[in-house]
Amino acid sequence: MVDLSVNLGGLAMSTPVATASGTFGYGFEYLGALDYSKLGAVTAKGIRLDPWPGNSMPRHAEVPGGLVNAIGLQGTGIDHFLDITVPHYMDQVKDAPPMIVNIWGGSIEEYAEVAKRLTEASQGESGRVIRAIECNVSCPNVKEGGHTFGQDPEVLRRLVSAVREKTTLPLIVKLAPNVPDIRLYVKACEHGGADALSMINTIPAMVIDIEKRRPVLANRTGGLSGRGIHPAAVKLVYDAHKATNLPILAMGGVYDASDAIEFLLAGATAVAVGTATFTDPSVAGKVCDGIADYCARHGFSSVGDLTGALQD
């Protein structure tokens, strides 16, 4: 029997497979389509202080190898999430997997306040499922000219530090891929007090309707996810693993167990399934089974033994 349990910076996961933020709703939308016992965690859609409408339609376009989206972080806001969403998740999902709550904001102060609210909630009944925070740092810093938090190492360090001060929950930072040297941002997360990293976020992209000579997305540009970004994601996970001891939740084009195993060998502790869920809602369970089968065939008694086991 292969031990599939892993520890992601203090978050105990029964399997190394999670769902990625933005592709799995708030955790209960896939009931009946997926065996939740195969999930080590569910990552909820991004939450900020207030409700947010997201971008105008159209806001997604299929492309060869994936999907370009500009949803715009549509969400319910922290009050509705804590009062309605989390209780519904606990009520509907039997033996609910732990929830990683993805958070975002327009200022460092907003991130910190959302983290504080989640931490307070986790000390009550909601603590059954609210078990970690994932900071999406690919958001505009309104107070500092609109540049994203994740593209300035010092701003990133200050953001992570501010959130760290407000939470005792495991703190995972979701890094952007479009930076000159990922190692600088990994170190910024370390110095700020992060417990783990998640990577990668989508890659900036654009789709043009050549007949109309107009962008397909109302937002003009969006983020590319899916199979097409997988090799780039593997390389960035490998680079990050070489630069830090922080555990990594890897994502980007996981469609089957072989994709996940690549991430693990490159240095990831766990993997998240995202865009593939849209074409096969049960895929995360299949990925989990495939990892277990690989470990058994190759003589690994624990999935943790795969992390960084790449033979250079």
Image (spheres, rainbow, N blue to C red):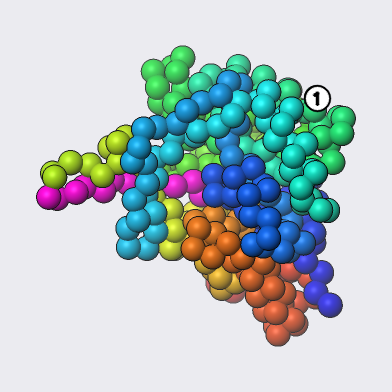
Find residue 256 and report its image quarter. Answer: bottom right
At a point 82% along the width and 35% down the height, the residue shown is 126
The quadrant of the picture occupied by the N terminus is bottom right
Label 1 crowd bin: few (<14), some (14–19), many (20+), radius 10 Å: some
**Residue that carries the numbered disc 1 in the rendered image:** 120
At a point 69% along the width and 42% down the height, the residue shown is 100
The picture places residue 99, in percent across and down from the top left corner, at 72, 44
At a point 80% along the width and 44% down the height, the residue shown is 91
Instruction: Please tell me whether residue 155 belongs to the stretch shown in magenta.
Output: no
Magenta part of the chain: 200-211
Q: How many marks?
A: 1
Mark 1 element type: helix
In this orientation, which residue lies closer to the viewer: 212 or 99? 212
Q: Do we see residue 89 in this rendering?
A: yes
The picture places residue 298, in percent across and down from the top left corner, at 70, 83
The picture places residue 291, in percent across and down from the top left corner, at 67, 72
Instruction: Please tell me whether residue 206 belongs to the stretch shown in magenta.
Output: yes
Q: Amino acid at mark 1?
A: Glu
Find residue 5 and report its image quarter. Answer: bottom right
Question: Would you place residue 196 above or below residue 14 in this image?
Answer: above
**Residue reaching furthest to the bottom:** 297
Find residue 174 and report its image quarter. Answer: top right
Q: Do we see residue 159 in this rendering?
A: no
The picture places residue 273, in percent across and down from the top left corner, at 58, 58
The quadrant of the picture occupied by the C terminus is bottom right
**Residue reaching furthest to the top:** 143
At a point 64% along the width and 55% down the height, the residue shown is 30
